[in-house]
Image (cartoon, helix red, strand yellow):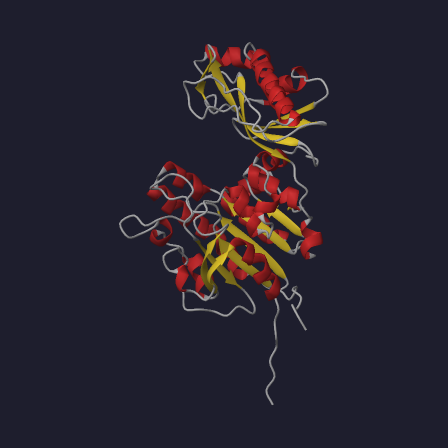
Amino acid sequence: MSTFTSTVAKKIMLIVLDGASDRPVDGATPMSRAKTPNLDRLAAEGINGIMDTISPGVRPGSDTSHLALLGYDPYEYYTGRGPFEAAGVGIEVKGGDIAFRCNFATVEDGVVTDRRAGRIKETDELEKTISEKVKVPGVEIIFKRSTGHRAALVLRGKGLSADITDTDPKKEGSPIKECHATNDSPEAKRTAEIVNSVSKQVVEALDSHPINVERRKNGLPAGNSILIRGAGMVPHIPDFYDRYHLKGAVVAAAGLIIGIGKMCGLEYLPLSGEEAKVEGSQVAAKVKKAVKALDTHDFVLLNIKGADEAGHDGDFEKKVAYMESADKALKSVLDLKDTIVIVTVDHSTPVSIKDHSADPVPVLINGAGVRVDDVTQYNELVAYKGGLCRIKGMDLMPIVLDLINLTKKFGA
């Protein structure tokens, strides 16, 4: 009588190739054109399909799609981008806070002349000045810079609302927009007044700041204002460990993804400068960090960003090159043991429209217990032939939890 050894994976690696999926240009997409032997091997030894991260026809944001991929219904937990951006830059957000994402911008004679202040980087002192000088009675103002021209703002206090409009005009040549309430509640009206006060005070505090005086001398745009948008009330999101009984971590560079991970209870594992130098590239360093994290964690979310930026730039060849470099960095994933590896995309960013689209994305699952299909390449043009067929983002966690034997029977 023959015997066999049954193997059940114990850990999960979720790899998100941010914005990598696309639409065909002359019959090919960047993913299908790129030479990706490691991703192709994962596809050939796994099960494949296409996925609507939210629902068919819905254009996902990176925020709503990542919530869905982690098993959190975005229609229930998404209140706006601001809370995740704030958490991502290191603000300890609390339930009831109103949070925003911001840009440092240039305003001259009341008109926005550069929405990113020349992609200003020297913002440490500007952050300190805003924190020291911008005050509103009865409300705590928390402001923190992020990377480059980006920043986050949090309002903390009673009687606040996220039902307000943005101040960002979304284009140069227009003044900073006045914030308005989107309903008649006193909370919304009060919050709009606070945002307008903060916006005005920032210009007064920063216009003659030494940093901006020096930038003007050098012919550079001054970072003398902030554009405030993406208001959201910080939601209560159930802790990832309480929900799944898995110790989770996130490895990412984008503040938004870091913030989502933190708010869901994933431990953020940043790269040290030395780690990045040793590996020679940010992607390779992040992959190594994520693989190492499986020694101490049960679940790791790895976000790889560059393809999305190429999509927004409308640069087909740049997107091809990035996919090929990411594939090389992912070679070590092939050696993972006792791990379910998922490779997917949070949303399509077609070079033809330079923005997110609702096109479904490819998804593969590789590991013990997976029923291997006939797909041998990883791209959106062939993934639909695989055994997963077409699923939604919210389906992903239940599928992989079952593969590691952490689901319960429904019924007798």
Is residue 87 something one can see in this rendering?
A: yes
- The percent coordinates of residue 295 (x first, y second) are 65, 55
On the rendered image, what quadrant is the C terminus found in?
Answer: bottom right
Residue most extreme to the bottom: 1
Rendered position, 351 above or below 46:
above
Q: Nearer the viewer, residue 316 or 345?
A: 345
Give the camera-side residue of 184 and 292. Answer: 184
Residue depicted at x 46% and y 10%:
109
Q: Quadrant of residue 252?
A: top right
Relative height, residue 319 to residue 190 (above, below)? below
Residue 402 place in picture, x, y as percent: 61, 65
Q: Position of residue 43 (x, y in %)?
A: 45, 62
Where's the N terminus, which quadrant?
A: bottom right
Q: Position of residue 73 (x, y in %)?
A: 59, 49
Considering every residue shown, the one lying at the far front of the view is 184
Q: Is residue 407 above or below residue 92?
A: below
Can residue 377 be seen here? The reply is no
Left or right placement of residue 274 versus residue 116 in this view: right
Question: To which quarter of the image does residue 399 belong?
Answer: bottom right
Tally of marks: 0
